[in-house]
Structures are given as structure tokens and as C-alpha cells.
């Protein structure tokens, strides 16, 4: 795609038309690289979940997609249009820190937000959808944290959007409220709404997202259906054996390793890698044959969390290594090191948080979802 965005139509891997396209997007705040050339696309009716550690660039990417920050490089298109020019009736955005007026009731708030659009949904219907009919007449400030987030989700949905961009939809919501919001998002997706969400909750990503993108250090380090990512990066099934006393650990390890298992040890437990369900009995038999007592067995399959831990920590380690190399180079320079010892680090880098940035960004925690 051209840098000026003149090629509007982007195709996803399987040929469907992309509703959201991000191509080579870069964003810096002073020395901090928030996005280091991110490309992804979200197709019609798809739920795309962005995961990644704090500071990975998720919110910056969401802001680039919704037009509240301008990338330094790259192109973003939403519904084939620049984010700042897209028809607000077709898109809904729920920022992480959205805070509506506190002294309006849940019903008044949804009515108010419905009034901002040309052809809104019936606000009472939305209130019912987010499970708040009983709290209709309660001031926002008197709702529980979970109810407040549900009102916010409702406010984002009153325009019946074709595209919903939501930053951490369920943070701070109790488990029941979380399930209500999940159900809502699933119903929207089933009805053809395209959803881009960020989340810290791996269960949420695994349940809702058709595809997940893992951002770390401003880079998209993996993207694909959760099951594929787990198969590719999640590691193997494992059996954790909690031992009855530490003194049996060497015997347990020795026995299992002799039997050909890959074993690691933790606090009072041994973890046996790559154990199929049908192998559990064999592991137990080996332990019993050498009189090792165990207090419990826990068999687990890898999940998205394992992918996250494996890949995000790799990237963080690389970034730390780079930052250390850079600071060593600078120290050497300060100590009178030769110019050729500088390496390619240039200045600074690392995860420095820049305040007083000269960015012209609009703050995205405004008083309405867009
Ligand atoms: P995430 O949402 O994944 O936690 P963010 O996109 O908020 O990550 O931040 C990515 C990086 O950019 C972080 O290092 C953050 O401190 C920095 N950053 C984000 N917004 C600003 C800003 N307005 N000014 C300076 N630094 C920022």
C-alpha cells in the first residue's frame, strides 16, 4: 500500500476484504518507540484481539486506528477511509479511560449517547442487552465498577456500529459482568460487527478472538488464530507432580529421566514435559516403583498464556539486552572508548517514559465514545 493511503482496498490472508488495515505503522514519543512498524488487518465480522505486556503499544495502536493519534509513518485505514475521516455513525470506540458524566442515570446516559447519532438503537434495548434494566434509574456514580463498565460498553453500542474498537472491555468487571460483556461482544460478532479489542485477559482473548496479535516492544511478534499460536509456540502438555516432602525430589527426577521423560523441578514439585493423558499412569507407576509419595497431580495443556509468556519475555529479554549494550557503549564512550566501539546504538533507547512530549495527540479519554 502506498504511504499516502491511495490504495484503499487491502486483502487479508484468505482474500477477504479488510475492514481495518494497519500497514507499517510507527509511532515514537521522544526516545520511546511505541510502535515499530506494525502491520495487521481485520476482516469483516472478525474479532481481533491484541494482547501484550504493559507498554507494548496496544493503546497507541488502538489510538492510531481510531484517529486519536497520528502515526509517524505507515498507513491506517478503517472502512476504507482514513480514521479521522470515517463516518462516526459506522464506528464505535470505547477507550480504556472513558468516564461519562457521573450524575446521570444509566438510562439517561444511554439516551444521551443515542442522541448523538443519526440512526441510533433504542436505548432501553441497549440497556437490557448490557444487563442493566434493573439499574436504569441509578446514577452512574452509584453503580458498581462492573455496572459502570457495562454502561460504557452500552454507550459504545447505541449507534449499532459496523466496527467496534474497544480497549480492555472487561477490566475491573466482576466475573458475572465479564460474561455478560463477552456474550454481548459474541452476539455483535455473530451479527457481523467487526471488533478490534485489547485485553490483558488471556481467557478473554482465547474465547472471543478469531485471531490474536501479540504486541511486545512495539512489534507484532505473532498473529493468528489462538489455537494455531498455541500449537506453534505454547509448548507441550505437562504433568506437575506435587511431592510429599523435598527429600524425594532427586529420586523422582532420576527415575523419570531414566524412563525418558524431560523433567524440571519447582518448589516441592517436579514438572514432566510432553505427557499425553495416556502417559499419566506410566509416570505414576514409575514414581510408585521407587516409593516416591506425591500429594497431587495436575495435568495441563498449553494455552495462550504460555504463548504470551514465551514470546513476550523473549522480546523483553532482547530489548533489555539491547538497552544494556547501548548503555555499555555509552559508558565506553564516556570513558574515552574509540569511536568504532560505539556499536549502532545511537542515543538512549530503552523503555524510557517521555513526559512533556511534543506530540500533538488528542487525549482519548474524552467524554464520549466515538
Ligand atoms: P500498552 O497499551 O500496550 O500498555 P501504550 O501504547 O500505552 O502501551 O504505550 C506504549 C509505549 O509508549 C509506552 O512506553 C508508553 O509509556 C509510551 N507512550 C504512550 N503514550 C505516550 C505519550 N502520550 N507520551 C509519551 N509516551 C507515551
Image: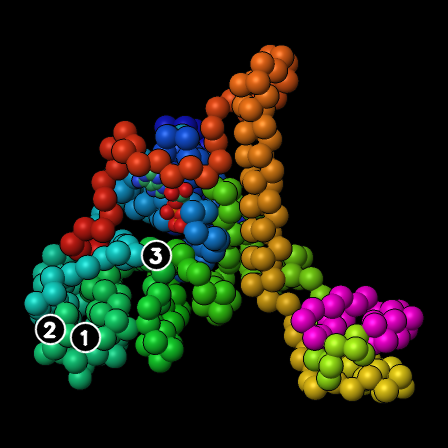
Q: Which residues are magenta?
A: 250-272
* Relative to 27, residue 191 above or below: below
Q: Which residue is mark 3?
A: 167
Mark 2 packing: few (<14 Cα in 10 Å), some, or many (20+)? some
Is 172 situated left or right of 137 in this image? right
Which of label 1 and label 3 is nearer to you?
1
Q: Are marks 2 and 1 in contact (CB under 8 Å)?
A: yes
Who's the residue at 65% across and 61% down the image?
Answer: 234
Which of these two is toward me, 323 or 53?
Answer: 323
Which mark is drawn over residue 143? 1
* Residue ID at (23%, 65%): 152
**Image quarter of residue 105:** bottom left
Q: Which mark is residue 217?
A: none
Q: Is residue 325 magenta?
A: no
Q: Nearer the viewer, mark 3 or mark 2?
A: 2
- Mark 3 beta carbon near ligand 1 (under 8 Å): yes
Question: Can residue 273 be seen by looking at this rendering?
Answer: no
The answer as to whether callout 2 falls within 8 Å of ligand 1 is no
Q: Secondary structure at mark 1?
A: loop
Q: Which residue is mark 2?
A: 139
Pointers 3 and 2 in contact (CB under 8 A)? no
Quadrant position of residue 290: bottom right
Q: Which of disc 2 and disc 3 is earlier in sequence?
A: 2
Residue 313 appears left or right of 75: right
> In which quarter of the view is residue 252 placed?
bottom right
Amino acid at each position: 500500500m502506498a504511504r499516502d493511503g491511495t490504495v484503499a482496498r487491502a486483502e487479508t490472508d484468505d482474500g477477504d476484504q479488510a475492514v481495518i488495515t494497519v500497514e507499517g505503522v510507527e509511532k515514537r514519543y521522544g526516545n520511546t518507540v511505541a510502535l515499530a512498524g506494525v502491520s495487521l488487518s481485520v476482516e469483516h465480522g472478525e474479532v481481533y484481539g491484541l494482547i501484550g505486556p504493559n507498554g507494548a503499544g496496544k493503546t497507541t495502536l488502538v489510538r492510531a486506528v481510531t484517529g486519536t493519534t497520528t502515526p509517524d509513518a505507515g498507513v491506517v485505514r478503517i472502512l476504507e477511509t482514513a480514521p479521522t475521516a470515517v463516518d462516526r455513525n459506522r464506528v464505535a470506540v470505547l477507550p480504556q479511560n472513558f468516564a461519562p458524566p457521573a450524575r446521570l442515570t444509566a438510562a439517561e446516559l444511554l439516551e444521551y449517547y443515542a442522541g448523538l447519532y443519526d440512526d441510533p438503537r433504542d436505548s432501553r434495548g441497549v440497556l437490557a442487552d448490557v444487563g442493566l434494566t434493573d439499574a436504569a434509574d441509578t446514577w452512574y456514580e452509584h453503580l458498581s465498577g462492573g455496572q459502570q463498565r457495562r454502561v460504557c460498553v452500552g454507550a459504545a453500542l447505541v449507534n449499532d456500529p459496523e466496527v467496534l474498537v474497544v480497549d480492555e472491555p472487561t477490566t475491573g468487571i466482576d466475573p458475572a459482568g465479564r460474561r455478560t460483556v463477552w456474550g454481548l461482544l459474541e452476539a455483535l460478532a455473530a451479527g457481523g460487527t467487526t471488533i478490534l479489542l485489547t485485553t490483558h485477559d488471556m481467557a478473554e482473548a482465547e474465547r472471543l478472538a478469531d485471531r490474536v496479535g501479540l504486541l511486545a516492544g512495539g512489534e507484532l511478534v505473532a498473529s493468528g488464530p489462538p489455537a494455531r499460536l498455541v500449537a506453534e509456540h505454547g509448548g507441550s502438555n505437562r504433568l506437575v507432580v506435587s511431592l510429599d516432602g523435598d527429600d524425594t525430589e532427586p529420586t523422582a527426577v532420576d527415575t523419570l529421566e531414566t524412563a525418558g521423560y524431560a523433567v524440571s523441578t519447582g518448589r516441592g514439585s517436579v514438572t514432566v514435559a510432553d505427557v499425553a493423558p495416556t502417559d499419566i499412569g506410566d509416570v505414576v507407576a514409575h514414581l510408585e516403583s521407587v516409593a516416591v509419595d506425591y500429594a497431587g497431580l495436575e495435568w495441563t495443556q498449553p494455552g495462550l498464556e504460555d504463548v504470551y509468556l514465551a514470546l513476550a519475555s523473549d522480546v523483553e529479554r532482547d530489548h533489555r539486552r539491547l538497552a544494556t549494550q547501548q548503555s555499555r557503549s555509552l559508558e565506553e564512550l564516556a570513558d574515552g572508548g574509540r569511536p568504532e566501539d560505539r556499536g549502532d546504538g545511537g542515543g538512549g533507547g530503552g523503555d524510557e517514559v517521555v513526559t512533556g512530549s511534543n506530540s500533538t495527540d488528542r487525549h482519548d479519554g474524552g467524554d464520549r465514545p466515538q
